[in-house]
Image (cartoon, rainbow, N blue to C red):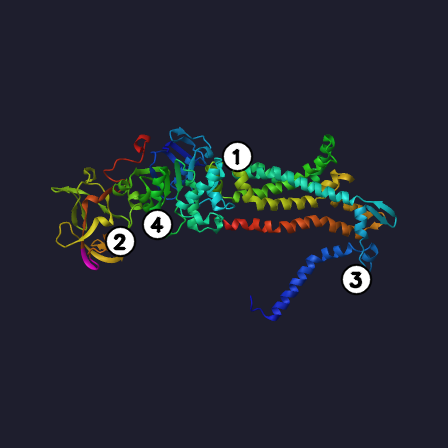
């Protein structure tokens, strides 16, 4: 590829730039909006040059939203904490339940194992709203509505099938002989699971965990129906920015920047594990 | 020290019977080679003994104890896998140490044990490497070291030389018998290479389609193969097989080869008048002068000098091709017309229809007592 002509290189550069602009524009624009007031954002025509302000972030962090109609309390930091707590706990619970289950499905072909595994996957087929209506009624009866436990439980519908099916594939990719060898060496099946299967499927488990975290973080509908203000994650909490005196674009942008930061950081950190996880299968032997 | 006894083992996968009522006994300290084509059930048999899969029927006794329902970790066997099955996330040292760690040996004992077996197998310098940094030969030795380190009384080796290069295989074929003898362990060794089987086995069990077709010393398997299939599998170059119909005259039983009557010393009476196949090992044929008794006229087609022997392809007057082998450095015809004679004692007669050797005991259904 060294002998490309100048024209080709220029065209390629332009093409790449267009692609990058296309994908990065919304994020960059939101990032810029988060440092502007509603007035400068709504200027026509829009301008790239503005005087940056931290007012949006201050408003979010202090919880005092000043609008034309007066001061409004917003629970953004509370929502952010709810998001972190709900997502982390849900993924932790799903890993705790899903990884051993995935191992069982991968290694032991028991009666009906395929049916059970598929049933778990089928949770993802049902439209969330269809599930939610009866679930809300049950939860109200059981006293689980508007509790963290109830929400984490419902979040398993998102996380558990995902983790189960991804991790199962990774366990199946480990040659059975490697585990046999450890058993024959004199170790119990549990030691084999812990010392052989878990480390070898590690990158896959990390990938599945990250994916489940992102799905849980981005969930909107479950929390909207089942949680009230003090338990709401940011996805639902963002609705508070649509106020009687208009939409608070500046605050929304700042909220978006704050709420994508954890997932973005996690994804960047886990990237190398993800790549390693995907390429692990290629070096069997 | 442990003997191994398999009683009426049956293993099925879905509708397919992989092992069909198989019984086998390996004496204490003996090396038994399981030999046969892929799909014969050798590896399945080994895994049953190791305890990682369970038989549908039958019993497995190790050292006289019934181990049929005992989990793999309590059977105390050592096993080396064909694909090495090393733990990719551990160093060679940790790989080898796993059997010792399972016994909760002290760090010092583990270190000493691993280092001594590593020295024996000449991998002392790569103990800190992960499997991916090892050559195939080193991987194979690491896998072998892991099987040996705990000094298990019963050692199961599943074609450990399959995935290494020819040179190393040759070296290991020389090294392994001594290594195994020094350990005094009972060994079950699986291979598809007849030379390996001959070199390593005190006895060889020839398996095919889930049953033991013949069980005997390497010498017996070679000299008295139970059927044509086994005769073909053992020996390089392959045995010559020709259709004949034995008859008898005043001098005894003879067969007609290219219109020449060749008398067979010690041929069984039962072969007379039957459609047979005669098996002639290339080394049981030799070039002779025209006037020798039993000289068969042939035309030399090609000659292949190998290191220790010369193999000549000849064609009979009926157009059948025969391989003749002679030690290197001995005289023989190299082209044109020639005559060969048969070393009649080593000729083998097989029934044309069944392929069984005529005069051999029926060894297909081995009962437990016979195998001991």
Q: Is residue A125 visible?
A: no
Mark earlier in primary sequence (2, 4): 4
Is residue B232 left or right of B261 when viewed as pictured? right
Look at discs 1 and 4 and give the one toward the viewer. 4
Subunit of label 3: A
Residue nearer the viewer, B318 or A177? A177
> Helix or strand or loop: what does disc 4 sit on?
helix
Question: How many C-alpha atoms fall within 10 Å of the one at disc 2: few (<14), some, or many (≥20)?
Answer: few
Subunit of label 1: A
Q: Do marks 1 and 4 share a subunit?
A: no
Q: Do marks 4 and 3 share a subunit?
A: no
Q: Which mark is residue B308?
A: 2
Using the numbered discs, state the Cα–Cα distance from disc 2 to disc 4 in whole angstroms.
15 Å
Q: Do marks 2 and 1 share a subunit?
A: no
Using the numbered discs, state the Cα–Cα distance from disc 2 to disc 1 in whole angstroms.
57 Å
Residue position marked by numbered label 4 in the rendering: B170
Name the spot of residue A189 as percent of width and height, x first: 51, 35
Name the spot of residue A183 as percent of width and height, x first: 48, 37
* Cβ atoms under marks 1 and 4 closer than 8 Å: no
Please state the extent of the stretch shown in magenta in the rendering.
Answer: B333-338
């Amino acid at each position: 590829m060294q002998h490309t002509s100048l024209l080709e290189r220029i065209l390629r550069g332009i093409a790449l730039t267009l692609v990058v602009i296309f994908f990065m524009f919304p994020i960059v624009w939101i990032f810029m909006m988060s440092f502007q007031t509603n007035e400068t954002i709504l200027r026509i025509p829009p301008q790239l040059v503005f005087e940056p302000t931290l007012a949006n972030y201050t408003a979010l962090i202090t919880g005092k939203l000043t609008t034309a109609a007066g001061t409004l309390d917003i629970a953004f930091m509370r929502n952010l904490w709810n998001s972190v707590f709900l997502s982390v706990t849900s993924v932790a619970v799903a890993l705790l339940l899903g990884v051993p289950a995935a191992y069982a499905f991968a290694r032991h072909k028991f009666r009906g194992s395929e049916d059970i595994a598929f049933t778990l996957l089928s949770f993802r087929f049902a439209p969330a709203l269809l599930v939610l209506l009866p679930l809300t009624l049950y939860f109200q009866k059981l006293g689980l509505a508007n509790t963290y436990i109830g929400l984490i439980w419902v979040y398993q519908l998102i996380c558990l099938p995902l983790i189960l099916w991804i991790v199962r594939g990774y366990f199946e990719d480990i040659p059975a002989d490697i585990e046999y060898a450890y058993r024959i060496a004199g170790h119990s099946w549990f030691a084999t699971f812990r010392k052989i299967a878990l480390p070898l499927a590690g990158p896959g488990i990390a990938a599945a965990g990250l994916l489940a975290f992102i799905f849980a973080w981005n969930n909107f509908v479950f929390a909207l129906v089942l949680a009230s203000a003090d338990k709401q994650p940011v996805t639902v909490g963002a609705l508070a920015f649509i106020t009687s005196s208009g939409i608070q674009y500046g605050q929304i942008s700042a909220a978006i920047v704050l709420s994508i930061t954890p997932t973005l950081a996690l994804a960047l950190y886990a990237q190398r594990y993800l790549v390693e996880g995907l390429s692990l299968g290629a070096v069997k032997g | 020290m442990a003997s191994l006894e398999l009683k009426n083992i049956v293993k099925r996968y879905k509708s397919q019977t992989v092992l069909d009522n198989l019984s086998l006994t390996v004496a204490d300290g003996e090396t038994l080679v399981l030999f046969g084509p892929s799909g014969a059930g050798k590896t399945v048999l080994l895994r049953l003994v190791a305890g990682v899969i369970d038989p549908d029927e039958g019993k497995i006794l190790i050292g006289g104890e019934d181990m049929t329902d005992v989990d793999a970790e309590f059977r105390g066997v050592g096993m080396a896998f064909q694909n090495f099955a090393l733990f990719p996330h551990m160093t060679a040292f940790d790989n080898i140490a796993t059997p010792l760690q399972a016994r909760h040996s002290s760090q010092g004992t583990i270190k000493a044990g691993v280092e001594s077996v590593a020295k024996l197998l000449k991998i002392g310098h790569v103990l800190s490497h992960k499997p991916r940094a090892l050559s195939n030969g080193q991987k194979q030795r690491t896998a072998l070291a892991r099987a040996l380190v705990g000094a298990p009384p019963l050692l199961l080796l599943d074609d450990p030389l399959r995935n290494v290069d020819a040179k190393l295989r040759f070296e290991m074929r020389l090294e392994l018998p001594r290594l195994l003898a020094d350990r005094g362990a009972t060994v079950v060794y699986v291979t598809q290479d007849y030379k390996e089987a001959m070199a390593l086995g005190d006895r060889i069990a020839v398996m095919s389609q889930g049953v033991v077709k013949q069980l005997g010393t390497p010498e017996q398997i070679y000299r008295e193969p139970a059927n044509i299939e086994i005769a073909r599998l053992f020996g390089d170059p392959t045995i010559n097989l020709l259709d004949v119909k034995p008859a008898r005259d005043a001098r005894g039983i003879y067969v007609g080869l290219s219109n020449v009557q060749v008398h067979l010393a010690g041929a069984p009476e039962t072969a007379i008048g039957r459609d047979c196949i005669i098996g002639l090992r290339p080394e049981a044929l030799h070039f002779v002068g025209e006037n020798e008794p039993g000289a068969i006229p042939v035309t030399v087609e090609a000659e292949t000098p190998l290191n220790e022997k010369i193999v000549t392809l000849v064609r009979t007057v009926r157009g059948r091709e025969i391989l003749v082998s002679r030690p290197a450095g001995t005289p023989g015809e190299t082209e044109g017309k020639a005559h060969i004679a048969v070393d009649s004692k080593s000729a083998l007669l097989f029934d044309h229809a069944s392929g069984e050797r005529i005069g051999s005991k029926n060894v297909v259904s081995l009962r437990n007592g016979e195998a001991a």
